[in-house]
Image (tube, grey):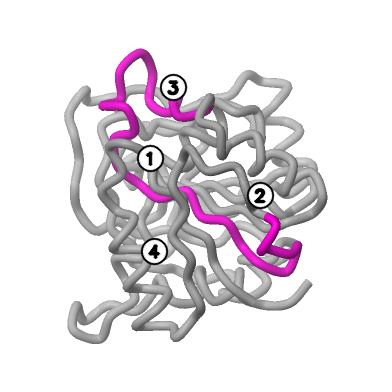
């Protein structure tokens, strides 16, 4: 299988993702420009990645302009056919803006950009990522100013009942409470998936936790989960 990484104007984690997948995890990677319209080289066993950064300078709302990039029409079609899609940080925001994931990302509750290691815990093993990493605590970096996940009550109820919450913020011991969230996210939500369990979004950056040189490889399991065959 292979990974396609979409590069938007303002993406700044696309190369981080490429090196993590290609060099650390030995996966095939294809870089894709946001104005391209061809995903015919990818099958549903492959994965399209929307990386972090500041697409279009985060003007209007984070991801709101990137959602209209020509490639996103193809990503939507790819996802609707069962193809795997991962959005990290700004990529998560774009997936929500595009309607591929429910809810949205708001300004951090402390109204400051946050960049640090946090702990997250896989919420359920009934999705591709959770089944691979298991229900355990992972140390993964975050870097965002608008990462506070929010959804209305009906959507949150659906996320819980369908077990679509993939990760929640926790402390090092795996305890989930409000003080362990870096942004004030509702229910400490750090990552979710769609009902079909083939589209994933998360605010923390697993690609920044894949190298032995960084003394943290907790992100490897997350990305390797998406390299598994359906």
Q: Secondary structure at mark 3?
A: loop
Specify whether 123 is left or right of 21.
right
Residue furthest top as drawn = 60
Residue name at image x 49 percent, y 33 percent: 94
Q: Residues within 10 Å of mark 2 (few under 14, many from 20)?
A: many
**Within the magenta stretch, is there residue 169?**
no
Q: Which residue is mark 3?
A: 65
Specify whether 217 is left or right of 3.
left
Q: Which residue is mark 2?
A: 199
Q: Which residue is mark 4?
A: 206
Q: Which residue is mark 1?
A: 8
What secondary structure prevails in the magenta region? loop
Query: Taking the image as drawn, is residue 107 in sight?
Result: yes
Query: Which badge, 4 or 2, comes first in the chain's sequence?
Result: 2
Q: In the drawing, what numbered circle is on residue 221?
A: none
- Compared with 177, 215 (above or below) is below
The residue range painted magenta reads 40-67
Q: Secondary structure at mark 2?
A: strand
Query: Taking the image as drawn, is residue 172 in sight?
Result: no
Marks 4/1: CA distance?
19 Å
Q: Residues within 10 Å of mark 1 (few under 14, many from 20)?
A: many
Query: Which badge, 4 or 1, comes first in the chain's sequence?
Result: 1
Q: Position of residue 23 (x, y in %)?
A: 34, 82
Which mark is in front, 2 or 1? 1
Which mark is in front, 4 or 1? 1
Residue name at image x 21 percent, y 23 percent: 111
Instruction: Report if the CB atoms under discs 1 and 3 are less than 8 Å apart.
Output: no
Query: Which badge, 2 or 3, comes first in the chain's sequence?
Result: 3
Q: Position of residue 145 (x, y in %)?
A: 26, 32
Specify whether 130 is left or right of 67.
right
């Amino acid at each position: 299988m292979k990974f396609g990484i979409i590069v938007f104007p303002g993406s700044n984690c696309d190369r981080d993702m490429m090196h993590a997948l290609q060099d650390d995890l030995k996966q095939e990677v294809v870089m894709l420009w946001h104005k391209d319209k061809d995903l015919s080289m990818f099958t549903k066993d492959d994965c399209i990645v929307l990386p972090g950064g500041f697409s279009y300078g985060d003007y209007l709302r984070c991801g709101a302009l990137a959602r209209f990039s020509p490639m996103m029409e193809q990503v939507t079609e790819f996802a609707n056919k069962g193809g795997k899609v991962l959005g990290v940080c700004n990529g998560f925001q774009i997936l929500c803006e595009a309607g591929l994931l429910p809810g949205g990302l708001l300004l951090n509750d402390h109204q400051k950009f946050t960049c640090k290691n946090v702990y997250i815990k896989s919420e359920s093993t009934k999705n591709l990522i959770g089944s691979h990493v298991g229900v355990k605590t992972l140390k993964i970096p975050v870097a965002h100013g608008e990462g506070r996940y929010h959804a209305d009550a009906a959507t949150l109820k659906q996320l819980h009942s369908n077990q679509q919450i993939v990760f929640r913020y926790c402390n090092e011991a795996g305890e989930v409470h409000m003080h362990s969230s870096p942004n004030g996210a509702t229910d400490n939500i750090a990552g979710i998936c769609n009902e079909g369990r083939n589209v994933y979004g998360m605010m923390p950056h697993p690609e920044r936790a894949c190298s032995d040189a960084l003394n943290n490889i907790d992100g490897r399991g997350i990305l390797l989960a998406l390299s598994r065959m359906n």
